[in-house]
Image (spheres, rainbow, N blue to C red):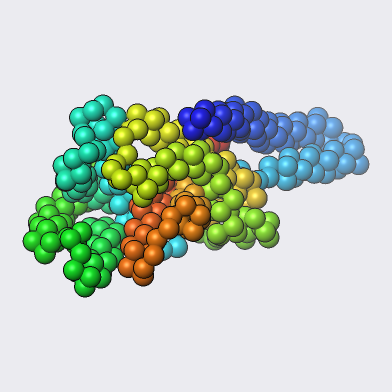
């Protein structure tokens, strides 16, 4: 049932995206080129008529004015996203923060895909929790290469110059946040003398892996991405004066857009989430075994998130709003907000947890999981939107 629900939503959304790419965008591109070419032909025709009918001053004046009006009208008809060719690739505000987030998202994506794929193929046995977690940590540490590389490429594309600082932020920001939250939670568990507390030696080993292996790998990836690789070239040049953005609709602002767009990816996974929560929080084994279904749903989720982000960013560009960089990231990760709301509902409706520490652990782990999920999906949305914007603006001839 979960897969059927996901396939239906993904299929409908794929049809919408295909329609936009195959009809709307192509029609807009051809329409713009046709209108501009028509205006130029009429202008040239006006010059010819002017030379041939130099004696008919009154007729020539009327025709020349009509030709100029037609060209102006043709250019005025070029509205929406095509007018943003000089601003659409303008460097976003706080781009130095966006680049490390995208890098960390690629690191998480590599780890998640590796774990789900190997578990679905039967290579990893989830009942051996120690081996499963250890392999996940190993994948995360090794993926520091991808984190540094993509962060450096995005940072260089944004015009950044201090790549060492960007590397340090990428290596410390998100892993440091997760470790800090986990360490504080472990202090509470230690205070209760619980056997589930992480031993001190394990914490030291995690720090050693982080600082001794992952940070150098992030450095290596960042060095190659910034020094050896070139920045991504944009198909249009950025104008010196920013274009004024017209008033936007109420639903096209900040968190509202992320919430509305995030409903669709959440609808893809909410049934599967119920099975995951039951396995983790209610079953005595505490293991989740249906990794084959999870792999299929995860693939559909990634495709759906990319398509939702593309449609949302296209609508934003049509409203002449070129601040799409951060918005694509937030729209891609918007379903994480609904997942956290789902966690809150599950806590009150399905679980019977008593005690401050148990509740604190539930909400803290849920928050960390939603942050990981949001960062991962936000990166998927950002890269999908970036590829889409480069594609459509590379297909037009911006004069």
Q: Residue at x 30, y 52 (%)?
A: 104
Query: Measured along the vertical axis of the image, is residue 316 above or below residue 14?
Result: below
Q: Residue at x 56, y 54 (%)?
A: 259
Depth check, front residue: 289 or 158: 289
| 78 relative position to 87: left or right | right
Where's residue 15, x and y in %? 59, 28
Q: Residue at x 23, y 70 (%)?
A: 192
Kindly give the residue lying farthest to the bottom in the view shown.
191
Determine which quarter of the picture holds residue 130. Answer: top left
| 1 relative position to 41: left or right | left
Looking at the image, can residue 37 be seen? Answer: no
Quadrant where the C terminus is found in the figure? top right
Looking at the image, can residue 280 be seen? Answer: yes
Instruction: Please state the total of marks drawn on the protein image.
Output: 0
Query: Measured along the vertical axis of the image, is residue 184 above or below residue 155?
Result: below
Where's residue 224, x and y in %? 20, 46
Depth check, front residue: 266 or 33: 266
Where's residue 133, x and y in %? 20, 46
| 175 relative position to 77: left or right | left
Depth check, front residue: 399 or 291: 291
Where's residue 129, x and y in %? 20, 44
Depth check, front residue: 234 or 48: 234
| 121 relative position to 233: left or right | left
Q: Residue at x 49, y 39 (%)?
A: 271
């Amino acid at each position: 049932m979960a897969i059927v629900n996901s396939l239906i939503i993904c299929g409908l959304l794929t049809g919408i995206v295909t329609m936009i790419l195959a009809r709307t965008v192509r029609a807009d591109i051809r329409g713009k080129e046709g209108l501009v070419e028509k205006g130029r032909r009429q202008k040239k025709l006006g010059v010819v008529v002017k030379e041939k009918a130099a004696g008919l001053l009154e007729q020539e004046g009327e025709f020349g004015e009509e030709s100029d009006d037609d060209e102006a009208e043709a250019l005025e008809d070029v509205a929406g996203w095509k007018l943003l060719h000089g601003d659409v690739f303008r460097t976003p505000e706080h781009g130095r923060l966006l680049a490390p987030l995208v890098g960390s998202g690629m690191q998480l994506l590599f780890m998640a895909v590796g774990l789900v794929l190997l578990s679905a193929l039967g290579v990893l046995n989830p009942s051996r929790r120690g081996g499963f977690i250890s392999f996940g940590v190993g994948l995360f540490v090794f993926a520091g290469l991808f984190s540094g590389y993509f962060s450096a490429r995005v940072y260089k594309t944004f015009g950044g110059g201090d790549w060492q600082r960007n590397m340090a932020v990428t290596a410390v920001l998100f892993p440091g946040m997760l470790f800090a939250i986990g360490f504080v939670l472990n202090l509470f568990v230690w205070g209760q003398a619980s056997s589930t507390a992480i031993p001190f030696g394990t914490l030291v080993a995690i720090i050693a892996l982080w600082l001794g292996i992952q940070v150098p790998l992030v450095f290596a990836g960042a060095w190659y991405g910034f020094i050896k690789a070139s920045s991504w070239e944009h198909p249009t040049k950025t104008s010196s004066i920013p274009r004024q953005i017209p008033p936007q609709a109420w639903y096209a602002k900040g968190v509202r857009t992320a919430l509305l767009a995030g409903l669709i990816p959440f609808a893809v996974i909410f049934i599967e989430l119920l099975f995951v929560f039951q396995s983790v929080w209610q079953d005595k084994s505490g293991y989740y075994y249906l990794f084959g279904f999870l792999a299929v749903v995860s693939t559909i989720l990634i495709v759906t998130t990319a398509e939702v982000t593309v449609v949302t960013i296209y609508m934003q560009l049509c409203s002449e709003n070129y601040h799409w960089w951060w918005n694509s990231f937030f729209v891609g990760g918007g379903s994480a907000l609904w997942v956290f709301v789902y966690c809150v509902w599950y806590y009150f409706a399905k679980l019977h947890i008593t005690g401050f520490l148990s509740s604190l652990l539930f909400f803290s782990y849920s928050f960390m999981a939603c942050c990981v999920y949001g960062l991962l999906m936000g990166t998927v949305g950002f890269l999908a939107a970036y590829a889409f914007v480069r594609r459509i603006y590379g297909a037009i001839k911006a004069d």
